[in-house]
């Protein structure tokens, strides 16, 4: 087929908008790695590494980890073999500086982003989602006590692992994270809009309905459309 492209994606949206949930579905369907900077940091924290200890200082307060640290981490990840067919970046970039550095890394690799999927979700909905979020401590599967509950309370459907609540998913830290999103992260949408990369998706409906919209957008991107 003419113009079939790889899929090099960024998924964008406020904390709790469903980036992780949709990324996992996209990753499975298209066979591209899901790169979540938040997940990488949580792994490092769990392992007690130096990077983890550094990141935790910021994450626990709802603040961003310094750009240099995140950029270098993402750079190393993108150099790995499995990113050749494409990737989906979740939670990165989060500042204009990170977006610019990402462009530099991609240029170095001879790649370009194909799309930025922007999940648009109301603020009250985002708070409802985050405060009842639960995550599998083993495989990272994402649940919601009301909207996407596990079959057995506290137990992961996929691997039997124990579910936990993220320490930064408390009301107070969530408020800070939303403020940081509005002031430091949301402005980079303009940078991507100017490049014609942004695909807005209504993230308010159910997980399945949002994924239907995402798939439609990605099929268009893959066949070279600029919709
Ligand atoms: P959410 O999915 O709720 O938006 P993440 O799991 O993406 O949260 O991120 C959790 C925390 O990890 C952030 O609040 C921030 O402290 C840190 N973090 C993740 N990605 C980045 C990044 N690109 N730049 C700076 N800090 C980051
Ligand atoms: P993010 O990565 O953007 O922080 P998540 O994918 O972790 O967001 O989703 C946040 C919470 O909302 C999780 O508990 C998840 O199960 C739930 N969730 C995700 N998408 C939807 C949706 N479309 N409708 C209802 N709940 C959702
Ligand atoms: Zn699991």
Image: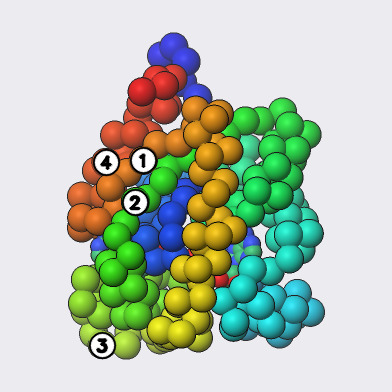
How packed is label 1: few (under 14 Cα within 10 Å), some, or many (20 or more)? some
Q: The residue tagged with tag 4: helix, strand or loop?
A: helix
For the C terminus, give its image quadrant. top left
Q: Residue furthest top?
A: 2
Q: Position of residue 182 (x, y in %)?
A: 50, 60
Nearest to the eye among marks 4 and 2: give it: 2
The reply, left or right, for residue 71 in relation to residue 1 is right
Ranked by sequence position, the earlier of labels 3 and 1 is 3
Q: In this view of the protein, can residue 129 be seen by the observer?
A: no
Q: Are marks 2 and 3 in contact (CB under 8 Å)?
A: no
Separation of marks 3 and 1 at Cα, in angstroms:
34 Å
Q: Which residue is mark 4?
A: 213
**Depth check, front residue: 142 or 200:** 200
Q: Which residue is mark 1?
A: 200
For the N terminus, give its image quadrant. top left
Q: Is residue 128 above or below residue 107?
A: below
Display coloring? rainbow
Separation of marks 1 and 2 at Cα, in angstroms:
7 Å
How packed is label 4: few (under 14 Cα within 10 Å), some, or many (20 or more)? some
Q: Are marks 4 and 2 in contact (CB under 8 Å)?
A: no
Q: Which residue is mark 2?
A: 120
**Depth check, front residue: 108 or 199:** 199
Q: Position of residue 2 (x, y in %)?
A: 44, 11
Ranked by sequence position, the earlier of labels 4 and 1 is 1
Q: Residue at x 37, y 70 (%)?
A: 142
Q: The residue tagged with tag 1: helix, strand or loop?
A: strand
Q: Position of residue 81 (x, y in %)?
A: 68, 44
Q: Are marks 1 and 2 in contact (CB under 8 Å)?
A: yes
How packed is label 3: few (under 14 Cα within 10 Å), some, or many (20 or more)? few
Q: Is residue 69 above or below residue 225?
A: below
Q: Which residue is mark 3?
A: 153
Ranked by sequence position, the earlier of labels 2 and 3 is 2
């Amino acid at each position: 087929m003419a113009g079939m492209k790889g899929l090099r994606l960024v998924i964008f949206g406020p904390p709790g908008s469903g980036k992780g949930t949709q990324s996992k579905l996209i990753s499975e369907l298209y066979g591209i790695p899901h790169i979540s900077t938040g997940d990488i940091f949580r792994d490092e924290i769990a392992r007690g590494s130096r990077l983890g200890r550094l990141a935790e200082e910021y994450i626990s307060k709802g603040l961003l980890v310094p750009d240099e640290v995140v950029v270098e981490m993402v750079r190393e990840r993108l150099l790995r073999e499995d990113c050749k067919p494409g990737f989906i970046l979740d939670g990165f970039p989060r500042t204009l500086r990170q977006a610019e550095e990402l462009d530099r890394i991609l240029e170095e690799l001879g790649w370009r982003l194909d799309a930025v999927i922007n999940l648009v979700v109301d603020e009250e909905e985002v708070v409802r989602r985050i405060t009842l979020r639960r995550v599998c401590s083993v495989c990272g599967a994402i649940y919601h006590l009301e909207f996407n509950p596990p079959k057995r309370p506290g137990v992961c459907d996929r691997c039997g692992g124990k579910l936990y609540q993220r320490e930064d998913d408390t009301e107070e830290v969530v408020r800070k994270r939303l403020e940081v999103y509005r002031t430091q992260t949301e402005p980079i949408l303009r940078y991507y809009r100017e490049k014609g990369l942004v695909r807005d998706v209504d993230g308010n409906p159910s997980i399945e309905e949002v994924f239907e919209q995402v798939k439609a957008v990605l099929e268009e991107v893959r066949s070279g459309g600029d919709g």
